[in-house]
Image (cartoon, rainbow, N blue to C red):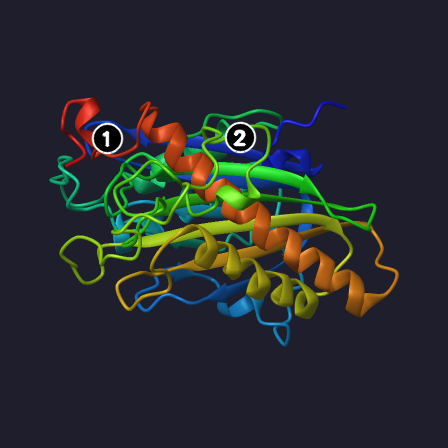
Amino acid sequence: MTRLNRITDISGIRVGHAEDARIASGVTALLFENPFVCAVDVRGGGPGTRETDLLDPASTVQAVDALVLSGGSAFGLDAAAGVVAHLREAGRGFAVGDVRVPIVPGAILFDLLNGGDKVWGRYPPYRDLGYAAADGARGGAFALGSVGAGFGARTANLKGGLGSASSAVPGLPAQVGALVAVNAFGRVTMGQGPHFWAAPFERDGEFGGLGLPPRMPDDALSWPREPLPGANTTLAIVATDARLTKAQAKRVAIAAQDGLARAIHPAHTPLDGDVVFAVATGAVPLGDEVADLARLGAAAGETLARAIAIGVHAATRLPCLDLPAWREIGGRLG
């Protein structure tokens, strides 16, 4: 089986996007073939989430049917309702008597000031975008860059975007995948130059193959653009085919947050709503639960760092990433 370097390399996961160019925003939905164990770790100071309390290991529901990442800030939380509607039509959901309730946690990023037309009337369009993303969800390859939840995303100096990557877990017969919408307060490159912070983890030139610079740029650690409180967020999902409990999945989500710190400077600020979900399909049992869990967490962090750089690289597609590349698409994204 050919590795696609996508989160869909984990069997049982489908991904769909929907976006609206007029509003310069969009939605990405992950649908699961079966309900899968899920946990979440929130590090940003301004998160926006839906149904994350039930992901606590002490909560009754043990698995989720789908996950949703959306633009639109709090308005984008409506996207999950569209995915719920799609799943209900398919007869999916947590059984309560003869009723099934689809379990669809989600998170949102802020893209309300990116130049799109946000005068959408009484109700925002995110419920319909969520339904469309779910309806279009497929296994295999899917688009990266300025698509779905990453359509209107930005970083401090470049267009943000939707990225994904996968990798085998060294020492285990398991694999991990990552999907991320990068809308960060910080930079994914070292200052204004073309070199990605995630360069040490790059594989096969997947985000340009430039490697590390011969010397650290003078502006590598300079502070990003003028901050705007609440106007940022990186949303991520890491998935594995390992068999995990909710508590173990939580530990993987915590470790995967290191991927943000490796790929974005700065990360986890009071201006971001950084969220990482972790999903486990359960196909591969762990041997040594402590050592194997450590291997999974390390691989998840490295894979997420790669996905972040891949998403921005796919959204910019410039020979040298030293310009605010969202100007390339008509200026509608700010």
Across and down, in percent, residue 100 comes to 60, 52
The residue lying at 17 percent from left, 52 percent from top is 225
| Residue 127 falls in image quadrant | top left
Tell me the number on the disc at residue 151.
none
Reading the image, the residue beneath label 1 is 325
| Along the line of sight, the residue nearer the viewer: 187 or 276 | 187
Q: CA distance from mark 2 to mark 1?
A: 28 Å
Instruction: Specify whether residue 66 is in view.
Output: no
CB contact under 8 Å: marks 2 and 1: no
Give SS at disc 1: helix
Residue at the extreme bottom of the image, as rendered: 58
Query: In the image, residue 142 lies at what x, y percent?
Result: 52, 26
| Viewer-closest of 280 and 163 | 163
Q: Amino acid at mark 1?
A: Ala
Residue 234 vertical placement versus 310 (above, below): below
Three-letter residue code for mark 2: Ala
- At x 31%, y 66%, the residue is 269
- Seen as rendered, the residue at the extreme right is 287
Q: Is residue 264 above or below residue 290?
A: above
Q: Nearer the viewer, residue 257 or 97?
A: 257
